[in-house]
Image (tube, rainbow, N blue to C red):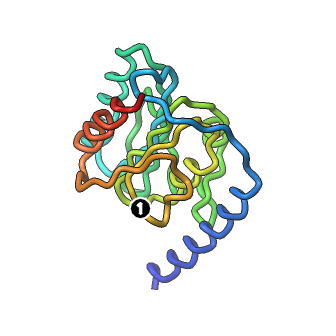
C-alpha cells in the first residue's frame, strides 16, 4: 500500500517537473571535466561508506583546482549522517510529491556550474528534480530513459558503487574536447 502511494506521489512530482521545465531556458554546452572550473555533485546517500566515497571524490576534484559544491539526499530516516563539505537534504525537506523545497536546494539550483554530476545510478526523484531545474551548463548522470529529457550527457553503466561510477564518468568526460 505504501509503495502504491509513493508511486502516485512520484507521478505527480514528474508531472509538476515537466510543467516547470517548459518555462525554463538555459544555455548549455559540453565541457570536459579537465576544463571545468565549477562542479556541482548530487548524490543519494544510503550509508556512511558512500558518504566517505563522495567526500574523497570531491577532494580529488578540489586538488585539481576545481570549485566543488555537493548536495546529498538521505531517504532513510534511521540514517543519521553529517558532513562538513556536503549539504544534506532528507525526506523532511521534500513536499508530498517528493519535490525538494529548501533554501539550500534553491541556492544549488541557481548555481551555474560548468558541470553538474548526478551520481545516482538509480532514480532518486528529488535529485532528478534538482538536476532538471539546475542552471548548469552541462548536466551529466547515469542513463535512465525516463530521465533523458533532464540531462545533456548520460552514461549507461553497470556500476552501482560511487567509486566505479565516478571512474567511468571521469574517463568519458575527459574525452570531450
Where on the picture, by quarter, is residue 25?
top right
Coordinates of residue 118 in the picture (x, y in percent): 44, 45
- Name, please, the residue furthest toward the right: 23
**In front here: 97 or 130?**
130
Left or right of 158? Residue 146 is right
Label 1 crowd (10 A; few <14 / some 14-19 / many >=20):
some
Q: Is residue 67 above or below residue 87?
A: above
Q: Is residue 75 above or below residue 7?
A: above
- Name, please, the residue furthest toward the bottom: 1
| SS at mark 1 in the image | loop
Q: Is residue 112 above or below residue 162?
A: above
Where on the picture, by quarter, is residue 98?
bottom right
- The residue at 47%/34% (across/down) is 70
Coordinates of residue 144 in the picture (x, y in percent): 41, 61
Q: How many marks?
A: 1
Coordinates of residue 158 in the picture (x, y in percent): 23, 56
Classify the position of the C terminus by image quarter.
Answer: top left
**In front here: 7 or 115?**
115
- The residue at 38%/52% (across/down) is 142
**In front here: 41 or 167?**
167
- Can you identify the residue that label 1 sits on? 144
**In front here: 149 or 117?**
149
- The residue at 58%/54% (across/down) is 129
Coordinates of residue 91 in the picture (x, y in percent): 52, 57
Amino acid at each position: 500500500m505504501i509503495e502504491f502511494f509513493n508511486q502516485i506521489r512520484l507521478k505527480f512530482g514528474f508531472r509538476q517537473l515537466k510543467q516547470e521545465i517548459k518555462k525554463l531556458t538555459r544555455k548549455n554546452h559540453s565541457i570536459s571535466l579537465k576544463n571545468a572550473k565549477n562542479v556541482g555533485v548530487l548524490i543519494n546517500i544510503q550509508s556512511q561508506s558512500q558518504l566517505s566515497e563522495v567526500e574523497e571524490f570531491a577532494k580529488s576534484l578540489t586538488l585539481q583546482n576545481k570549485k566543488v559544491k555537493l548536495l546529498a539526499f538521505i531517504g532513510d530516516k534511521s540514517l543519521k549522517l553529517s558532513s562538513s563539505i556536503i549539504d544534506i537534504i532528507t525526506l523532511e525537506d521534500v513536499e508530498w510529491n517528493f519535490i525538494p523545497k529548501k533554501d539550500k536546494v534553491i541556492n544549488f539550483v541557481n548555481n551555474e556550474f560548468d558541470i553538474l554530476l548526478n551520481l545516482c545510478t538509480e532514480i532518486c526523484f528529488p535529485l532528478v528534480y534538482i538536476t532538471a531545474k539546475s542552471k548548469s551548463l552541462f548536466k551529466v548522470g547515469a542513463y535512465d530513459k525516463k530521465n533523458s529529457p533532464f540531462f545533456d550527457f548520460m552514461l549507461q553503466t553497470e556500476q552501482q558503487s560511487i567509486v566505479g561510477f565516478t571512474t567511468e564518468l571521469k574517463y568519458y568526460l575527459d574525452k570531450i574536447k
